[in-house]
Image (spheres, rainbow, N blue to C red):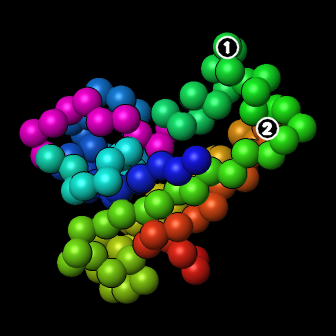
Amino acid sequence: MAADIHYAPPSVCTKQRNVPQDATTKQRGCFLLTHDPPVATKSNYASSDDILAYLIAPQRIAAFQASKRLYIALCFKVDDELNVCDGTKRASADWMFLADELVAIYTEHIEAYKLNVEFILDGTATGI
């Protein structure tokens, strides 16, 4: 299983109906589920939070707690001009912060809900 996760800046994330409108979103941006760069005028992208909501939904959670492990590749996408390893740019620092936060939250959910799921970082996140 795989999901394309594209970094979007705060100017796009604050317009999204499916993205929590918290301080992090307003200051750092978010990860939206889309292969292509997010369109600034679109407001109905799913977000990385929706993956967790899907896994722990009451009608599905038992399937993800089963003895057979499910591997989910998170294929991170960024716009061409963003080098996520270049900590000198605000957007790259925001991307790294969000990626670290995503891994921590996903790990917490795997442990709390006893999910037999493993996330594989792919795309731009390979090697971090």
Relative to residue 52, is residue 23 drawn left or right? Answer: left
Label 1: which secondary element: loop
Residue 102, position in %: x, y? 56, 53
Residue at left 38%, top 45%? 33
* Front in this rendered view, residue 3 or 26: 3
Report the disc number at residue 59. 1
Task: List the single residue furthest toward the top.
Answer: 59
Image vertical order of residue 55 relative to residue 71, above or below: above
How dense is the environment of label 1, judged by Cα within 10 Å: few (below 14), some, or many (20 and up)?
Answer: few
Residue 20, position in %: x, y? 40, 33
Residue at left 57%, top 28%? 54
Relative to residue 118, is residue 52 drawn left or right? Answer: left
Residue 73, position in %: x, y? 57, 56
* Front in this rendered view, residue 47 or 30: 47
Q: Which region of the structure is painted magenta?
A: 40-49
Q: CA distance from mark 2 to mark 1?
A: 14 Å
* Front in this rendered view, residue 44 or 71: 71
